[in-house]
Amino acid sequence: MKFPQPIPVRDLAERFQAQLIGDASLSATGINEIHKVEPGDVAFSDAPKYFQKTLDSAATVILLNAPAECPPGKAILVVEKPFEVYDTLIRDYRPFEPSTSPVSHRAQIHPTAIIEPGVVIAANVSIGAHCYIQANTYIGEYTTIGDHVTIGPNTTIGSDAFYFKKHPDGTYQKWRSGGRVIIEDQVDIGAGCTINKGVSGDTVIGAGSKLDCQIHIGHGVVVGKNCLMAAQVGIGGKTIIEDNVVLYGQVGIIQAVRIGKGAIVLAGAGVSKSLEGGKAYFGAPAEEMREKYKEIAATRQLPELLRKLGERARASRESGPSDENEK
């Protein structure tokens, strides 16, 4: 998420009564999670074991709850509760605004777009030329939709990220979702899909990609160009799907992994780690298809192998001691 204008780090320190360490001349231009930060962004950590990872990231302004050595070209703001400051900044620049009409007067819709009855379009949405948004679909705030995009009925675009801060007492606090959904040109999305916006970054569906019905895309997922996904695929947050990937029905992918360009994942597979591009995968956990089929073939032979081993063991017992042993 980018701020409307840069915020001097001195102003942030003053507002949140923070100890300022490092370059006090810097300004913050945006805010983002650690896996998506860019130069100029604000990031945070409230666990000492993650301090160094945050300091080594591209973030320019780092919120910590204890002093640390500041790398050159960065600034640290030491505050009691970094998460609260982070969440406050997102709420300041992406304040909650419930829809009060089916189509917000602050939505920009190209005159060639077709919007069927029952569609709800929130504020700050942009819909490009020749789009077709079918009945009862919801398009959440700050969503950007390119040209020639088709979205099936009862689909939800831009729902809140499933992202919660866990407190020491075991309770959860919801983050304000300040990210967006960006749907590029020539994308087709089926009926009953759900695409979450990012926590503070963007969820992206690349140009030319085609999604079947009842697919879920988690927060901050980036789907490349010309990808194909069959029904009931589920993709965990922060995952990156490179170009020309094919995911068959009911593929499940955990969060924060990468699927390489041109990979094919067969139906029902469970992806628990990053996969190289240009290969086909199958199974749970998903592995390269040829190796997985060899493993399955070997497993099928186990009962017969065990039977033969059992017969040999029985024959050995029944034959008794050998003549050599008797001597």
Image: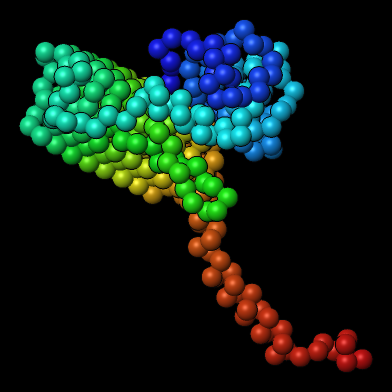
Based on the displayed image, in which of its 4 quarters is residue 55 positioned?
Answer: top right
Looking at the image, residue 300 sits to the left or right of residue 205; the answer is: right
Q: Residue at x 65, y 15 (%)?
A: 74
Whole-percent x and y of residue 202?
Answer: 40, 25
Foreground of the two, 160 or 305: 160
Rendered residue at 43%/15% (across/down) = 3
Q: Answer whether residue 212 is visible to the viewer in this image.
A: no
Up-down: is 32 above or below 301? above
- Pick out the residue farthest to the right: 327
Query: Split into 4 quadrants, where in the image is the C terminus?
Result: bottom right
Q: Find residue 233 and report its horizontal and vertical position in percent.
A: 35, 42
Residue at the (41%, 45%) spot, across then down? 252
Q: Residue sitting at 57 percent across and 75 percent down?
A: 307
Q: Is residue 224 left or right of residue 123?
A: right
Picture quarter with the N terminus: top left
Q: How is the image coloured?
A: rainbow
Which is nearer the eye, 97 or 274?
Answer: 97
Please indicate, yes or no, whether residue 314 appears anywhere in the rendered image.
yes
Residue reaching furthest top?
A: 25
Q: Nearer the viewer, residue 216 or 36?
A: 36
How far from the left and from the top, in percent, is residue 128?
A: 21, 15
Counting the numbered discs, the total is 0
Q: Based on the displayed image, in which of its 4 quarters is residue 176 positioned?
A: top left
Position of residue 123 measured from the top left corner of the image (x, y, whole percent): 24, 23
